[in-house]
Amino acid sequence: MLEIDHIQGDPYAPASRMRLTLAKTYHPLFSKIPDTPLHRLATEELFLREFAKRLPGESLPHGDGPGGRLKTVRPGPWIRRRSAVTYGPAGLTLRFSYSFPAHARRILGEPAAEVLGNRLTGLSMDLFDAVTLEKIEALAAHLGRRASIRQAMESNGLVAFFPEGANVARDEDGSPIPKAKALRVPDELATEILLEDGTKLRGLGLPKGITVLAGSAFHGKTTLLEAIADASADLRTGDGLALACSVAQTEFVCVEENRSVATCDLSPFFRSLPGQEPTEFAVDEASGATSQAANLHEALASGAKLLLVDEDASAANFLTRDPRMASLLPKGESVVPLVARARELAERGVSLVVVAGASSEWLAVADRVIVLSEFQPFDATAKARAVVEEAGIAVKKPQPADWARSLSDQLMDKWKDLAGLSVSKIRVQDGLVRLGPSAESRLPRRFAEDDSLRAAAMLIAEWLRHCRDRNLAPHRDGMMEFLAGRMDSSDPWGTHAGHDLAWPRPRETWALWTRLQASRKSANAEEED
């Protein structure tokens, strides 16, 4: 069944949105697929990849502009729920866009009929030549194996695990780059985990707590950090990190200079700030330190369990502080650096992996120190402790932070005019999100891709409508529960979603909202002026 959700207004307008649904009776394969979440995800992944590969070849360009072209999303290395494909009780639904062939405002019927009536029908059958029950079973087993590794990680007190032979250096689709060096794990770093099926895996395990990655430039520190971030999602069998895993709540924390910050409590990291209280910090253009602190606050508020920090992408005065420089300040030091709070975070169950090369203070708080040399890891924990003792390195312990207050549930203020905003009013391009005429936000690609930002914007509007219709005050924690409930449904997207949405992480959704709040407050201030 072919359904048209939206038809473009002219040849140059955004393409028409369509759905192709293959009922459970369409092909015998559907009756053989086991009814489990892993098999559902494997089925969606395999069909979407084949559909995305074959669909452009069925285009028949005609008329003005991009007329006649078919398009759907091209999945990257992550296996995640996407609006482009849904497999459930109704069967398999594939979403795509089609630019109708047209001259002026008149659709050209013959090429449109050829594509929609003939080519898509043939493509539907061709998909079953490429997607077989054996492939679905194999991918589901692979996803189950990754889940088993994560269970073993929890049992062994690990936040990340990289099996021996993994290829950390990968290209955009996850394939190992030419001349990539496979991971070799020395005995002193080796961890062995036991899976549910009795299989033992040997590899590099990063324990809960604080891990410091050190080494000379261009020896693989940042590459490993990025691999840890990628391993928080599910990856394909052919990926260089196919069996590498990190906890799902892994978040990168870095500088976002000049970003606007909505009201949040940064008192764990600032004793004072000019013109305002750290407990209610808000600004149109943040500095390096305040932007990274706000970034970290977003990650913690959305449930992060592992924070990734790279010195090269951080504000130096936020990570560590030199007491000799502080002696120059008229009112003394106002910043409480991250290194001084790292142990507190670890005791709260939030681990850190820090790429450090410029400050030895991180050695004083580290549970494990790993040196990367020629892209291979070596244990330097004992040597680091000797250096700390010999040099007398110590991190001054500040007063404990009031984390309960700082991270308490937050009311989503000034929200009613965005409640239930139409999907057609949401625009996302290169990290810039616009919700109607009055709100916009930007997130760097390091935090979120456009497809997950579109989904986050759509879900925020739905959550606010849910609160408006039930006369509820929207809060952050309620939104997180709403997202979790929607994700578990057979079709979390709704009827009129396009093909270009990917299920967002909690941090992506909350970070998008906080930035929208900040931009709206700036706009309101300008109107008052």
Image: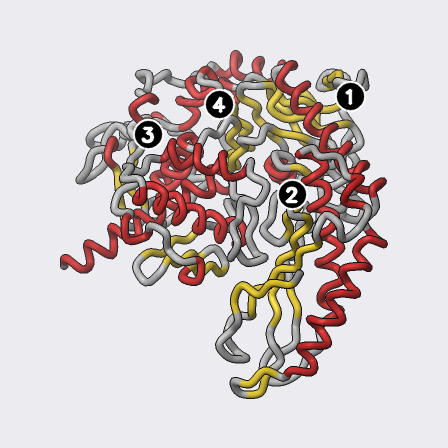
Q: CA distance from mark 3 to mark 1?
A: 41 Å
Residue behind mark 4 = 350
Along the viewing direction, whichever of 418 and 29 lies nearer the viewer:
29
Amino acid on which the number 4 mark rests in the picture: Val
Along the viewing direction, whichever of 270 and 476 lies nearer the viewer:
476
Residue 208 found in image quarter: top right
Q: CA distance from mark 3 to mark 2?
A: 37 Å
Of badges 4 and 3, the one in the foreground is: 3
Q: Earlier in the sequence, mark 3 or mark 2?
A: 2
Which element is circle 4 on? loop
Which element is circle 1 on? strand
Q: Are marks 3 and 1 in contact (CB under 8 Å)?
A: no
**Residue 110, x across and y down, in percent:** 69, 83
**Residue 239, x across and y down, in percent:** 75, 42
Residue behind mark 1 = 202
Residue occupying image coordinates x 66% and y 68%: 70
Q: Can see residue 356? A: no
Of badges 3 and 1, the one in the foreground is: 3
245 left or right of 304?
right
Residue occupying image coordinates x 74% and y 36%: 242
Residue behind mark 2 = 89
Amino acid on which the number 3 mark rests in the picture: Asp
Q: Earlier in the sequence, mark 4 or mark 3?
A: 4
Amino acid on which the number 1 mark rests in the picture: Arg
Q: Earlier in the sequence, mark 1 or mark 2?
A: 2
